[in-house]
Amino acid sequence: MKINLAKTNYKKLKVVQINGGYNILKKLNSMGIFEGAFIEKITSYHHGPVIVKVMNSQLAIGRGMAEKIIVEEMS
């Protein structure tokens, strides 16, 4: 599922795929978001950015970029 559709405050989400070109992959990789990474969705609204926690940092990702991140919920 896309990260903007995942439940809020779900403890572990695993990035399984990023549907984007070289520039998006490079940008997300520099933020610590890549295939196989574990992240946590903090919050998102109907409009605006999606806030995620990567390692010990909170990041705001634009909605368009967030829709390209495919995650699966981990237990």
Image (cartoon, rainbow, N blue to C red):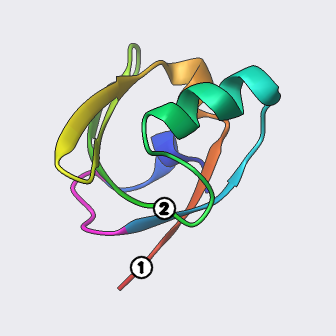
* Residue furthest right in the image: 21
Look at the image and say whether residue 69 sits in the magenta stretch. no
Q: Is residue 30 above or below residue 14?
A: above
In which quadrant will I find the C terminus?
Answer: bottom left
Q: Residue at x 65, y 30 (%)?
A: 26
Q: Amino acid at mark 1?
A: Met
Q: Secondary structure at mark 1?
A: loop
Query: Would you identify the image quadrant in which residue 25 lies?
Result: top right
- At 47% from the left and 18% from the top, the residue drawn is 62
Which element type, helix, strand or loop, lies under badge 2?
A: loop
Q: Is residue 15 left or right of residue 43?
A: right
Q: Would you say the magenta stretch is mainly helix, strand or loop?
A: loop
Q: Amino acid at mark 2?
A: Ala
In the figure, 32 relative to 27: above or below?
A: below
- Mark sitting earlier along the chain (1/2): 2
Q: Position of residue 33 (x, y in %)?
A: 49, 46
Q: Residue at x 61, y 57 (%)?
A: 1
- Is-magenta flag for residue 10? yes
Residue in the foreground of this view, choosing between 56 and 61: 56
Of circles 1 and 2, the one toward us is 2
> Height in image: 40 above or below 36?
above
Residue 50 in which image quadrant: top left
Q: Which mark is residue 74?
A: 1
Q: Position of residue 24 (x, y in %)?
A: 68, 26
Residue placed under numbered mark 2 in the picture: 37
Provide residue 55's location: percent of width, then percent of height: 25, 54
Q: How many marks?
A: 2
**Left or right of 7 on screen, residue 71:** right
State the extent of the magenta-drawn residues as a range.
8-12
Q: Give how far across and how far down residue 11 sits, in percent.
A: 24, 67
Q: Residue furthest left?
A: 56
Q: Residues within 10 Å of mark 2 (few under 14, many from 20)?
A: some
